[in-house]
Image: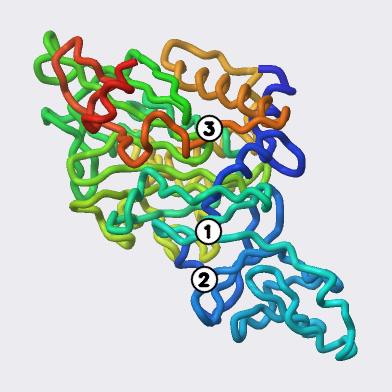
Amino acid sequence: MTPAENDLLCLVEGDAPMGKLMRQFWVPALLSEEIEVDGKPTRVKLFGEPLVAYRDSNGTVGLMGEFCPHRGASLVYGRNEKCALRCLYHGWKMDAEGNILEMPSEPTASPLKQKIKQKAYPTKEWGGFVWAFMGDQAHIPNFLPPPFCPNENTKVSISKIKIPCNWAQITEGQIDSAHSSSLHSSDMVPAPVEFGQATDTQWLRPSTDKSPRFEIQETDFGFRYAAIRRPIKQATTHDYVRVTVYVAPFISLIPPNTSYRVATVIVPIDNENTAFHFIAFGEGDVPSTQTWRKFLSTTVGEDLNPDYTNRRHLGNDFMQDRELMKQGNYTGISGIPNQDIAMWVGMGPIANRSHDILGASDQAIVTFRRLMHSAAKATGEGKTVFDHSTSTISLDQLKAWEEVVDKGTNWRILGAAPEEIQELQT
């Protein structure tokens, strides 16, 4: 990739085409748990834009520009009172829609408050997130439930980590099935099982094969691909298939285990920082949020700072334990996400892809780069891309999958609902 191509893929601030693309979608802006009724406002930054989020007296979530339109004081320090946010500096008060309700510093008869409005974005709470639409406010699309939470009864547990690197290298890590056999080999342990299974401390998988072969299916929402490995049992007659789904631009569905499904949501804070969310979800034995974060070594106040930044970082080598490595642990880094984060952050804030040497195991990476380059260029030309509302494959039926199957099985229909099979076969 050339530097210009890398910029097209990575940059999201201002008028960057990739940022414009992402603003066409409802964005997972923050976790619902980050704000409480009449509580402290919270700083939020998305695509380089500084914002403030708060929950008003009625429970409604406001998301608006961080700085007061009067003189630019930060509304993070504001008073959250009586269904609006009041700036401390001169007492200007504005509601979740950006209407200026009071201007105590102005004459009573002043028409000024009718003439101005604070920038504010519409919000929707669903699946543990506060979602916002930051695109054309004259054409706000209907909110569509994400594939990791198709209905309100879906159990969802989220681990959030703020990571000091670009969104694209994180997404490439999530859609790269080959690395899990090495990087996560002490946590995703080969075992003679029929399906991937979860214990309290590990994920078990039925293969020792570190060199999967890949098959890819592009779709109107992104792409799906199969990483096909040799299973431990019945290797001559069966394949171990792991199907990953990329739902552009934010969501990846990761092959599940027998207890719960797994997804990631990756949202750019700015060009060099990203909010990464690792999610367990499903209808059955989904771990609680506390259990999930403990399993991943991402507990707030223990592994993470209160602002979701990691206490493992480049400055302390991600707390890598070399003695533990001598005892057989592959990385010496605790927690599946932390192992990934060490790789992503170690590449630099924005990876220099002109130095990459890609191989057969990188087919999904190549597809991602080509797909998102094309989509960003189309967005720059004023076109709409990845319209989930018109997708020929319904996202509420879409699943990642993993299974040991007979050789020759059509992986495209694994885990699909009957009404989806014909479409997925094409």
Colouring scheme applied when the structure was drawn: rainbow
The answer to whether mark 1 and mark 2 are in CB contact below 8 A is yes
What type is the residue that disc 3 sits on?
Answer: Phe
**In which quadrant of the rendered image does the C terminus lie?**
top left
What type is the residue that disc 1 sits on?
Answer: Leu
x, y (%) of residue 120? 68, 63
Looking at the image, can residue 77 be seen? yes
Q: Report the side of 129 relative to 54 (left or right).
A: left
Q: Which residue is mark 3?
A: 386
Please name the residue shown 44% across and 63% down the image: 300
Density class for disc 2 (Cα within 10 Å; few <14, some 14-19, many ≥20) is: some
Sequence-wise, the earlier of marks 3 and 2 is: 2
Density class for disc 1 (Cα within 10 Å; few <14, some 14-19, many ≥20) is: many
Q: Which residue is mark 1?
A: 30
Sequence-wise, the earlier of marks 1 and 2 is: 1
Q: Which residue is mark 2?
A: 35
Sequence-wise, the earlier of marks 1 and 3 is: 1
Q: Is residue 389 above or below residue 111?
A: above
Camera-nearest residue between 41 and 273: 41
The answer to whether mark 3 and mark 2 are in CB contact below 8 A is no
Density class for disc 3 (Cα within 10 Å; few <14, some 14-19, many ≥20) is: some
Q: Report the side of 69 relative to 336 (left or right).
A: right
x, y (%) of residue 382? 71, 32
Please name the residue shown 86% across and 87% down the image: 105
Q: Toward which corner of the image does residue 421 lie, by quadrant?
A: top left
Marks 1 and 3, how far apart in space? 23 Å
Q: Secondary structure at mark 3?
A: loop
x, y (%) of residue 284? 19, 52
Q: Secondary structure at mark 2?
A: loop
Marks 1 and 2, how far apart in space? 9 Å
Q: Report the side of 133 relative to 343 (left or right).
A: right
Please name the residue shown 40% across and 40% down the image: 322
